[in-house]
Amino acid sequence: MNTKDYIESGLLELYVYGVLSTKEQAEIAHDIAKDPELQAEVESIEAILLKLSKATSPGVKPSIKELVVTKLRSKSFQHRPKVKIITSNYSYFGWAAAILFLGGILWLLKLNQDLQNDIEVVNSQLETKEIQVTEVSQKVETLEELFLQMGDPSTRKLTLPGNKLNAPNSSVVAFYTDEKEELILDISRLPEASDGMVYQVWSFKFDPLTPKSIGLLAEANSSENKVFRFQNVPEPEGFGITLEPAGGSEQPNLKQLYALGTI
């Protein structure tokens, strides 16, 4: 700050009045000691105050009042440093921050939606796995029941030899329980049914020959399903398996007989 700015700032008046902080008083005193013009200005201000203090009338003498007012106006008001108004970029920063904040919220919403979608996919996969586990558990339970029934002393084990014309190297193992009227067939040694055809199981009475359809082996070609259970099979004298058109037949086609056995 140069001498002119110092004088016009009003700091010297405040220094003389003693209203500045101790640090500011010391700094200004240091500057005054180095500048004769500042010293003269301080002496002028002190002279004005001295004249004011010597006034003894109830009111201030017009000459002194005019001198004080003129001096204070010239130093403290008319020559105050101009305040430069600086246009701040803070408002722009505020808008930018608001936009970034809004963008962050939108990004979080998108992230949350993606997470929800991932959770739904995982839940769907878990449900699928649970269904698969349930199906496997049911199959295991069914096999356990079959094995228990096969080992039951009241269950008769039968072998249905393959027909020499259609399946000379094949055979079917049958387990029949009279009390439950239940039949279990192991067809793992039968050849796969040709396209458009299905194996059909029959119970027979031989005098006279009376066939009765027990059911279809619709999933016989599945590598996982070679054991079948049939219920409500009363008083059979024998069992046979024929190859029939898809959907089955009312009467067996004995020319397509693949296995036959008697009890």
Image (tube, rainbow, N blue to C red):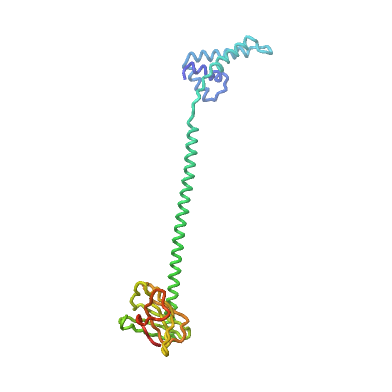
Residue 67 seen: yes
Q: Residue at x 41, y 78 (%)?
A: 249
Q: Residue 51: name its quadrant.
A: top right
Q: Residue 207: name its quadrant.
A: bottom left
Q: How many marks?
A: 0
Q: Percent from the top left, x then y, of residue 28?
A: 50, 20
The quarter of the image holding the C terminus is bottom left
Give the side of residue 67 with respect to residue 100, left or right.
right
Q: Percent from the top left, x then y, of residue 105?
A: 49, 44
Q: Percent from the top left, x then y, of residue 67?
A: 60, 11
Give the side of residue 146 with respect to residue 192, left or right.
right
Q: Residue 183: name its quadrant.
A: bottom left
Q: Percent from the top left, x then y, of residue 242?
A: 37, 80
- Taking depth in this image into account, of 257 and 89 the one nearest to the observer is 257
Q: Is residue 19 positioned above or below 193 on the image? A: above
Give the side of residue 23 with respect to residue 161, left or right.
right
Residue 258 seen: no
Q: Residue at x 38, y 75 (%)?
A: 245
The residue sitting at the right extreme is 58
The residue sitting at the top extreme is 63
- Taking depth in this image into account, of 217 and 223 the one nearest to the observer is 217
Q: Is residue 66 positioned above or below 177 on the image? A: above
- Taking depth in this image into account, of 229 and 131 the one nearest to the observer is 229
- Taking depth in this image into account, of 91 and 253 the one nearest to the observer is 253
Q: Is residue 11 positioned above or below 234 on the image? A: above
